[in-house]
Image (spheres, rainbow, N blue to C red):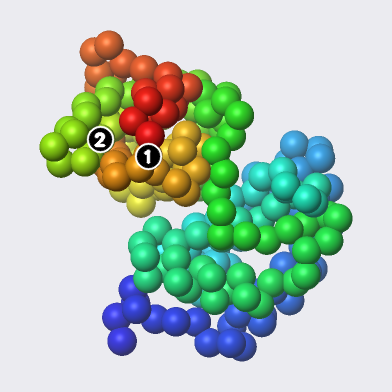
Amino acid sequence: MAEAERMPGPEAITEFWSWWNRIREPLAEAIRADRAQEFVEPLRDRLGALHPDLRFSLRPGLQAAHALSITGATPRADDIAHTVLDGAPADDEHWEYSGLSLPVADPATMTCVVGDLTIEMSGARVAVEHFPDLGAVVVQFFHPVLAGLAPELVEDVLDSALSAVVGRVEPARTRIIAMHVEREPADALDLSELRLFLDRLV
C-alpha cells in the first residue's frame, strides 16, 4: 500500500493519545510561558509517524483553555485525521480536540514554527490574482526567511499562513492556490489585507 493511502492501526492511535496524556499538562504550562515551540517538533514527529500528511495547530479553545486541531493536507489525510480524533480524550476545561483550523484575529501578527525556525508572519507579502471564470485565486507568497528552506517546510508555512487567513473554509466556489516566490511581488499585500481581499469573494 502506498504511504499516502496507509491508515494507522488502532494500536498506533492509542499510543499517540497515551503519549499526549503525558505531555498535555506540560504543554499547557509551556503555552502559558510562551514556550510552546518546545513541543512542536515532538508533536509533528508523533503525528507524522501516524501519517505523513497530518497537520496540527495549537490555539485557544472555543470552550476549553486550549485546543489541539488535527487536519490533513489531502482529502485522504483529512479522513485519517478524523479517525485519529475519534480516539481523542473527552474535552474538558483545559483541552478540546477538533478537525478545525480557525482563522486568527490578525493573521499578520501570527508566528509559524517550522523546524528550528520561528517565522513572524508580519514579514509575509503576497500578490493575488483572481480568475473568476476558473473559480480560483492564485496567491504568490513571499517571505525573506523562506529562501533556502526545504520544500516541505515552505509548504508547511504556506499551509499555516492560509489557515490563519481563512481557516478551513475557503471563499464560496473559489479555490485558493498558493505558491512560493523568491522575490517580493509588486503592489504586495500583507496577510490581513489578503483576508480582506478574500472576504470580498464570499
Which residue is drawn at the image coordinates 61% and 70% (left, top)?
A: 85
State whether residue 50 is above or below residue 150: below
Task: Give left or right: position of 195 versus 120.
Answer: left
Q: Give residue 171's quadrant in the image.
A: top left
Query: In which image quadrant can residue 105 be found?
Result: top right
- Camera-nearest residue between 120 and 188: 188
Q: Is residue 98 left or right of residue 159?
A: right
Residue 88 sits above or below residue 97 on the image: below
Disc 2 and disc 1 in contact, CB within 8 angstroms: yes
Query: Which residue occupies 73% across, 58% down?
Result: 96
The N terminus: image quadrant: bottom left
**In the rendered structure, which amino acid carries the disc numbered 2?**
Val
List the single residue furthest toward the left.
133
Crowding at label 2, few (<14), some or many (≥20) Cα neighbours within 10 Å?
some
Dot 2: element: strand
Q: Who's the residue at 39% across and 81% down the image?
A: 6
Q: Which mark is residue 171?
A: 1
Q: Position of residue 81 (x, y in %)?
A: 51, 68
Q: Residues within 10 Å of mark 1 (few under 14, many from 20)?
A: some
Where residue 2 appears, x then y in whole percent? 29, 80
Q: Residue 30: x percent and y percent? A: 78, 46
The residue that mark 2 highlights is 137
